[in-house]
Image (cartoon, helix red, strand yellow):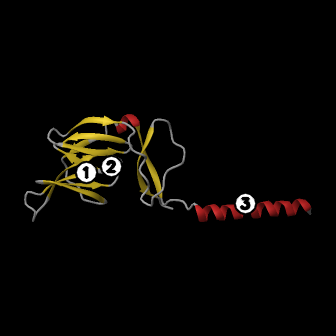
Amino acid sequence: MRKRVLILTFASCVAILAFVRASLFPQSVYTPVFMERPELEKSVFYDAGARELVNPGKIYHRAPYIYVNEKYKGVYVIDNTRPEQPRVEGFIVAPGCMDIAIKGDILYVDNAVDLVAFDLSTRRVTKRVKEVFPEPLSPDGRSYYGSRPDDYVLVGWKKSNR
């Protein structure tokens, strides 16, 4: 009898702790997307193909172009020569991108945890400074605390099917 009471008490405590944990630390509806470090370092490039804006972020205007961040993906290059008919000219692929800035012909973009300088005239990366930024948070504002393989970098989040 004593053993049975002890087991029931233990099971009750486990259930209460699970409830408290779920209440205080709800699971994110997003799962992290990782990329190997060597692949990340080759991942920033100009793609002349047109794309549809899906999840736009920050906008930067530098006549005659408008640059629009696609969260976690990169930067749209929009020709605004005719404001009544702006045209997506290309896309700068930059996994993990959440922020952009321009000075002269250089676009500064975050490539996950790295800062990348991208020359807009030559359309090439001119410099990379590694591990300047913290990992990107999930869209619901959570950090990732799980395990991961060595030499992998968190570059984005995708919605889970939970």
Q: Residue at x 46, y 50 (%)?
A: 32
- Residue 134, x across and y down, in percent: 42, 46
Is 74 placed left or right of 61 in the picture?
A: right
- Mark carried by residue 97: 2
Q: Secondary structure at mark 3?
A: helix
Q: Which residue is mark 1?
A: 75
Q: Kindly indicate whether the residue at mark 1 contacts the one at mark 3 (C-beta within 8 angstroms).
A: no
Q: x, y (%) of residue 46?
A: 22, 43
Q: Residues within 10 Å of mark 2 (few under 14, many from 20)?
A: many
Sequence-wise first label, 3 or 1: 3
Whichever of callouts 3 and 2 sits on the residue coming sooner in the sequence is: 3
Sooner in the amino-acid sequence: mark 1 or mark 2:
1
Residue contact at pointers 1 and 2, CB within 8 angstroms: yes
- Secondary structure at badge 1 equals strand
- Please state which amino acid type lies under the numbered disc 2: Cys
Query: Looking at numbered disc 3 in the image, what kind of residue is underneath it?
Result: Val
Residue at image coords 40%, 39%: 131
Return the mark for residue 14: 3
